[in-house]
Image (tube, rainbow, N blue to C red):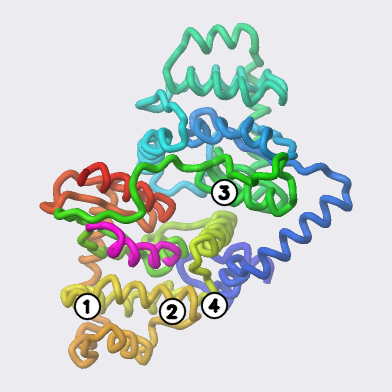
Amino acid sequence: MIQALRNFLTRRTFAYKIRNKAMNMFSSFENFQRIRKQAEENRVAEGRNHEVLYFHKVDDPYSHLTVHYIDKFKEAYDVEFKPILVGEENPAALHEPSLYTDYCLEDAKRIAPFYDVNFPGNSYPEKYLVNKANSILSAVSLEEFTSMAKTVSHALWGNDLAKLEELEAKHKTSEQDVIENLKKGNEIRNDCDYYFGSAFYYEKELYWGVDRLNHLEDRLTELGLNKSSDNEPICLLQKKAPETMRAEKKVNLTYYPSLNSPYTFVSAKRVKEFQDEYPVNLITRPVLPMLMRMMVIPAFKGKYIISDAAREGRKYGYEMKEIYSPIGKPARKAYSLFPLIDSMGKGFEYINELLKASFQDGINIGKDEYLEETVSSIGLDWSVIKKDLNTSKWKKVLNDNVKDMYQGNCWGVPSFKITDADGSNPFYVWGQDRMWLLKEEINRRLN
């Protein structure tokens, strides 16, 4: 059973009962609380201080952002930070690597100003510069690491060879020692069930990038580790866009959801609210789940995705409850009705209902009775809609949607695209945690 759970997302198809049990276990709030409580009890029993691990990868654009927050955390919370230098990402966790690297660089550049961080790069640094950066940081002490890592990062992304050579003259490590240091760092990262850089780890829980530091702050605050009594968070977005906007013109907001994506579920409530808050024409373009696009998600990544999405859902008041994964036949049946339903103006409503059924109500959306009830609940005639049940015209629609999503270097869901009303000037973002950036872009266009 344990091995089956560890492999619960490594294949496209397997026993649905095992898959659903695993997904419910990792999303469970009760399980989440139990793990936190046990971790703290173990830490106290073992006499360990509060220690946060930080995984830094020199040529990861997100690490350039996160490293700027370590000193701020040290000032605000009574915890020890242990920086760990890591190398290449776990390749099993990378899907569409060329799209991934292109997107991450563009994304980091876009969000950096909102976190008051200067990002000096327009392209990834050359390998020889990366080697110098790793050599320098492998030579410094833990106490020096944060300050030096910021200096090195600015020089690296700014292609400042002279600065790196100046630093390397004072802090140099042999090539073999650098290799061993990165290998050790990767092993520690892997033992924490993680796979990228720019992540923080505290007692059985991971926090990737600046987007998740709010969860780490909440946890440290709950433990009473604030050094001051104001409890003000130190990682705050400096947003310019208002919460709501009215304008004569509208933009197109294209939404790329997937029926098996916990992050898509977490986004759906806010997408619905978006229509009331901002002047948008919502266009829903669903795509196949990654597992049905012949991608393999390793167990450690699947575990993180579900537990993190559940954590984000609780943050936004949209908790996962009983999960029934629709992978395979249920998804295909549900998708078969989408083109016709969408042509009648109910595409988003239909997808939203399917997501709630799969991630809150534990319903098999492939049941004819459920589909009939859902179609009727959104105001459509089942006798008309059911004619497309199990037909195949949906396949081209979803394939075209994926191709369009890929145009913005987006491969995962939910992804979004903003265009002007005539479909021009596309702006793509990936992830439910970038919905604030959509508002920033719309505010920029319409003001």
Q: Amino acid at mark 4?
A: Glu
Within 10 Å of disc 3 (Cα), the crowding (few <14, some 14-19, many 20+) is some
Q: Nearer the viewer, mark 1 or mark 3?
A: 3
Q: Which residue is mark 2?
A: 357
Q: Which comes sooner in the sequence, label 3 or label 4? A: 3
Which residues, given as a range, are shown in magenta? Answer: 265-279
Q: Position of residue 286 (x, y in %)?
A: 30, 65
- Label 4 – label 1 distance at C-alpha: 26 Å
Could you tell whether 61 is left or right of 282 in the image?
A: right
Q: Which residue is mark 1?
A: 341
Look at the picture and state if 300 lies above or below 201: below
Tell me which amino acid carries mark 2.
Answer: Ala
Crowding at dot 4, Cα within 10 Å, few <14 / some 14-19 / many 20+, comes out as many
Q: Is residue 111 left or right of residue 91?
A: left
Q: Nearer the viewer, residue 346 or 390?
A: 346
The residue carrying mark 3 is 214
Q: Position of residue 248 (x, y in %)?
A: 15, 55
Read off the residue under disc 4.
322
Foreground: 419 or 159? 419
